[in-house]
Image: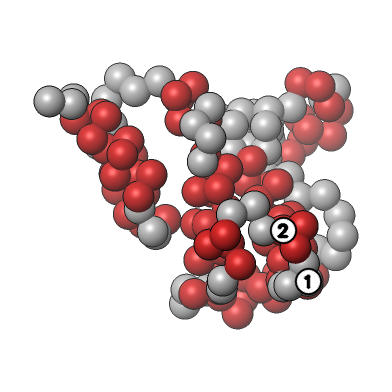
């Protein structure tokens, strides 16, 4: 029998909504973040959750407008508590910090990928998985 953390981990990998992922993640105990961030589908799950939120939620229109207004600039998730999804720094710290000290910024990268997909929905370079070709 697997432990509850392993069961939650497997359920999160199969989850289809951000709310479901958050609810499941809240129940995880003693599960190292390194296991999550090194999973081969980690970034794909972030992207899928953002794709759903931007295209299929009550907030979609507003989010798409806000994303469009950002132009082509780099998108950075300035969260001082998260060096995986964010850069591990707040916005003010990021302005003066050496770029090498930034975290992975997976949310920012996901938003940039989403922006590119919205602008070029049929671009083959955006399809990392067969199921990613569908909206």
Q: Residue at x 74, y 27 (%)?
A: 102
Q: Which residue is drawn at 51% across and 41% down?
A: 41
Where is residue 70? Give x, y as percent: 80, 63
Height in image: 53 above or below 41?
Answer: below
| Classed neighbour count for the residue bearing mark 2: other residues with Cα under 10 Å, few (<14), some (14–19), many (≥20) | some
Tell me the element at label 2.
helix
**Viewport quadrant of the C terminus:** bottom right
Give the side of residue 74 with respect to residue 39, left or right. right
Q: Using the rendered image of the protein, determine whether residue 64 is visible from the camera's viewpoint.
A: yes
Give the numbered dot on residue 126. Answer: 2
Q: How many numbered markers are drawn?
A: 2
Q: Which of 35 and 100 is in front in this view?
A: 35
Which badge, 2 or 1, is on the more N-terminal residue? 1
- In the current view of this chain or complex, which residue is farthest to the left? 1
Q: Nearer the viewer, residue 63 or 40?
A: 40
Give the side of residue 73 with respect to residue 10, left or right. right
Where is residue 16? Give x, y as percent: 38, 59
Q: Which residue is drawn at 44% across and 24% down?
A: 35
Q: Nearer the viewer, residue 127 or 53?
A: 127
Where is residue 22? Give x, y as percent: 36, 47
| Classed neighbour count for the residue bearing mark 1: other residues with Cα under 10 Å, few (<14), some (14–19), many (≥20) | few
**Residue beneath disc 1:** 120
Q: Using the rendered image of the protein, determine whether residue 26 is visible from the camera's viewpoint.
A: no
Give the side of residue 65 with respect to residue 46, left or right. right
Colour scheme of this structure image? secondary structure
Q: Do the residues labelled 2 and 1 touch (CB within 8 Å)?
A: yes
Height in image: 95 above or below 43?
Answer: above
Where is residue 25? Give x, y as percent: 33, 39
Give the side of residue 105 with respect to residue 75, left or right. left
**Viewport quadrant of the N terminus:** top left
């Amino acid at each position: 029998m697997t432990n509850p953390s392993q069961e939650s981990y497997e359920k999160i990998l199969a989850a289809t909504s951000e709310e479901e992922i958050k609810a499941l993640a809240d129940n995880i105990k003693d599960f190292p973040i390194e296991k999550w961030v090194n999973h081969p589908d980690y970034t794909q799950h972030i992207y899928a959750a953002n794709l759903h939120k931007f295209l299929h939620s009550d907030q979609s229109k507003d989010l798409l407008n806000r994303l469009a207004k950002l132009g082509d600039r780099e998108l950075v998730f300035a969260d001082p508590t998260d060096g995986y999804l964010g850069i591990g720094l707040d916005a003010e710290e990021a302005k003066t910090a050496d770029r090498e000290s930034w975290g992975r910024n997976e949310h920012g990268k996901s938003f940039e990928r989403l922006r590119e997909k919205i602008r070029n929905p049929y671009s083959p370079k955006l399809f990392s998985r067969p199921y990613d070709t569908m909206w």
